[in-house]
Image (tube, rainbow, N blue to C red):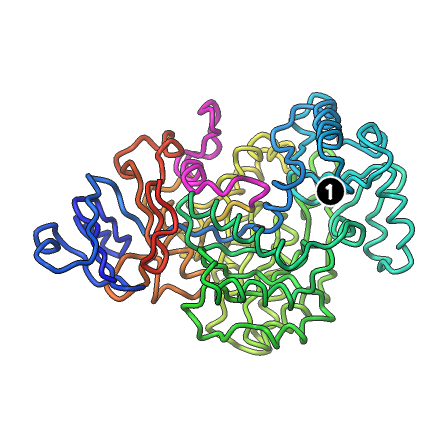
Amino acid sequence: MRRLWYHGAVDSMDRSMTRYEAIGTEDSRIVFLGTDREALAQDWDERTDLEGRQVLPGFSDTHMHLLHYVLFQKNLALFGVGSIEDIVRLGRERVERDAPPYLLGMGWNQETMSEGRMPDRRDLDRISTEIPICLMRVCAHIAACNSAMMERLKAIQGRVPAAVWEKVDLENGLLREEAMRLYMEIIPPESDEEVKEMIRRGARELNAAGITCIHSDDLQVLAGMDPLRLVELFRELEREGALTVRIYEQCLVEPDRFEDFQAVRSDPADRTSLFRTGPRKLLQDGSLGAKSAEMIAGYVDEPDNHGIPIHTEEELYELIRAAHSRRMDVAVHAIGDLALQKVCNAVERVQREDPWPQARHGVVHAQTTTPALLERMKAWNLQAYIQPIFIEADMEIIAQRVGEAHAQECYNWKSMGELGLHISGGSDCPVEPFDILDNLRAAVTRQNRAGTKTYLPQQALTVEEGLRLFTSGAAWASRDEEVRGTLELGKLADLVVLEGDLFSADPAQFPKIAVWETVLNGKTVFHR
């Protein structure tokens, strides 16, 4: 089918930043870019008058958790909650209304709650002492549980690795880092059809935000779900024609299952399947908010606290080496500068032992950096998966955590780009919403949403630089720069149509610009 969109502002995001009036597609590919006059002289099966609207490459989010997001939307979303009392009230309302067999939630943040502390077992017992409850902090690195959940966890202690169990605080009902996933041992599994509906639901919401591709970490989220089976469910949806977003899976797999996982790994040469397995996902530390990010100098108020390492340096090296030897990229969660240093050490070591110039290993977050660490990332071609939207919350705590001087070296996106690092943008949803335009606002303004506070304005990106995080830069992150990420002849027809022009609008107003249409492979998957 030949489709034409004309009378618009078609921003190709190519190297010359060419702007066209019209774009045409045939089946899944772009076949025309040019003027309205040239376009309307050709034959098309369908013509759409854009009435001046802006067209851009379909948006990408290069780090999120799709199934986590839908799981908590189905349960109890606590983002922005103002107090522990509010958590208790909302939890009670949900239990009384729906009588669920368990309660999962996410979104609380002690930094913004009136009590100024984390909820604990005693607080959540006020919701229920009968059903197990697990409520995660906004960062997903600490969870609070009630007594019923802790009793069930105690019953399975014998089959939990000691290194994980040591992160369980039975007295206060707190789970840290890997221990948070223990809830999956307690709650009942979803059926295959329920999981597929979760994916469909999430994809619909992504399409409505103009998103055509996500890099998502999903393999260790759902109770009772084998990672290999989940991969097959994604592929079933694609075969059924029910997958409306590209998913590049960041594969978090237990070390003892990594070799088994190779059997379902996508062909590295595949650039067109909607679902593909991407890099091996690894986690090296926690978060700033939870004071579990690995910091070289510790924290300002706790200098002896250097965070919580997930792996020893030797373990991290072995995990990266296993993927590297399979010519599989890695994407390593590293928020603290010490964690980033360890990632650089490991990548340097494996590259010296087994050179792979084409590797696109990366660091997820890369928040607390130094000029020397950025230079090391450049030297070993480490890409950065950044989340500009994080500064909304983190600008309030960064100096408290790392000190004023070090805070000047953090979230240094402009410096990354000037060094020539490959950077792409994500939301870490459900930590933050997958709102590309709000994420872009943060990248360009470096301000909070209220516009009352600015953090390191010298590190702000231009609108073009910000858009590349979610278009061409994101395509590079998944090795797709030859087939998508810009609007060029022959590339895949992934488009987003906006009601306003980002290049002339006030960046503070970007979130108010509506998505009018989203197109994947030449087919409309969302229309306002």
Question: The magenta stretch spans which residues?
Answer: 429-458
Q: In which quadrant of the rendered image does the N terminus lie?
A: bottom left
Q: Quadrant of residue 406?
A: top right
Residue drawn where x is 80% and y is 39% of the image: 145
Residue 76 in the image: state x and y as whole percent. 67, 36
> Left or right: where does residue 149 sit relative to residue 450?
right
Q: What residue did someone put label 1 on?
A: 142
Instruction: Give yes or no for residue 72 being in the magenta stretch.
Output: no
State the predominant SS element of the stretch in magenta: loop
> Viewer-proximal residue, 486 or 416?
486
Residue 513 in the image: state x and y as whole percent. 35, 34
Q: Quadrant of residue 171?
A: top right
Q: Residues within 10 Å of mark 1 (few under 14, many from 20)?
A: many
Instruction: Give the secondary structure at mark 1.
Output: strand
> Left or right: where does residue 13 sit relative to residue 311?
left
Task: Classify 93 as above or below 233.
Answer: above
